Image (tube, rainbow, N blue to C red):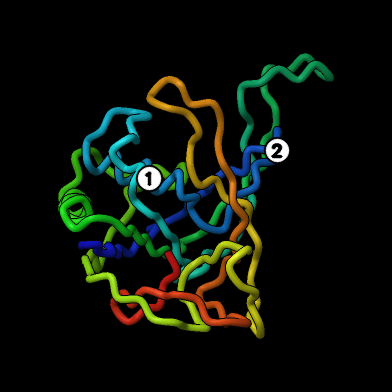
Amino acid sequence: MLKVLYAQLEIPFWCSFRVPYGVNMHFTYPVPPLTTLAGLVAAALGYPADFLEPLAGLVFGVGLEREGRLIETYTRIIKRDYRDQSLRTLLCRQKLLQPVFGLYIKGPEPEVAKIGAALRDPFFPLFLGESDDPVEIRQIGVYPLKEEPSSVVDNCLPVDVALPVETECQVANLPVRFTGKKRGQWTGVEYQSYYVAPRLQLDREVPAALVGGRRVYL
């Protein structure tokens, strides 16, 4: 039987999910990529680095429950600047202050229940988005998979599923999975574009799972 796990991820201070295109300017994604959430779950379960095969059959989703305030900070990093022979270069990094995200995982009941137990008592300390502060995980619950058509969803939606109407949202091209066969043989990252907003009103109905009062597309 398929189940859906929900967990609220609260950032106590700041986080940053680096978009891998800038050099001296590090932009952040508005929500944690699905690859980041898979890594968080793997750490909770005690898996070694890059060991993600047991999670391959699960469906991950992310919700934006409270938008963090976007700021920019400046840091001098060790990197040679040949213009003045300096060993340090100025780096600008975007950060999100105190956002709250929703983690959703759809999968077989034994696996989802195991992840829920691991999030309550993780093997490793859990961090999210470059911050040194442990992420606060609340409201962990496992729900039966019950889907019904809905024109409103409470999580981020792939852009090829439906169009948002009367909703302010961002579009983010998020990393969703690593490509490769096994640990040490990753060949790259697969991306998918998502509409990002706390709630999306859509131009059509989509199959949505009912998860603790939320409608979620997975």
Q: Is residue 80 above or below residue 200?
A: above
Which one is nearer the viewer's eye here, 159 or 46?
Answer: 159
What's the CA distance linking mark 1 and mark 2? 24 Å
As helix, strand or loop, the secondary structure at mark 2 comes to loop
Q: Could you say where residue 162 lies in the image, as x and y percent from the top left?
A: 61, 72
Q: Is residue 105 left or right of residue 82?
A: left
Q: Residues within 10 Å of mark 1 (few under 14, many from 20)?
A: many
* Residue 5, x across and y down, in percent: 27, 62
The quarter holding residue 26 reads: top right
Judged by depth in the image, the label closer to the viewer, 1 or 2, is: 1
Residue 124 appears in which quarter of the rendering? top left
Cβ–Cβ under 8 Å for marks 1 and 2: no
Mark found first going from the N terminus, 1 or 2? 2
What residue is rendered at 38% in x and 58% in y? 12
Q: Residue at x 23, y 55 (%)?
A: 108
The residue type indicated by label 1 comes to Ala
Q: Which residue lies at the image location 65% right of the left edge and 47% below the top edge?
A: 27
Residue 47 lies, with reference to residue 33, above or below; the image says above
Residue 182 lies, in percent from the top left, at 39, 26
Q: Nearer the viewer, residue 50 or 144?
A: 144
Q: Which residue is mark 1?
A: 38
The answer to whether 158 appears left or right of 155 in the picture is: right
**Corner quadrant of residue 138:** bottom left
Figure quadrant of the C terminus:
bottom left
Residue 7 place in picture, x, y as percent? 30, 63
Mark 2 belongs to which amino acid? Gly
Q: Secondary structure at mark 1?
A: helix
Residue at mark 2: 22
Q: Is residue 205 left or right of residue 19?
A: left
**Label 2: few (<14), some (14–19) or many (≥20) C-alpha neighbours in 10 Å:** few
Residue plotted at (52% across, 83% down): 151
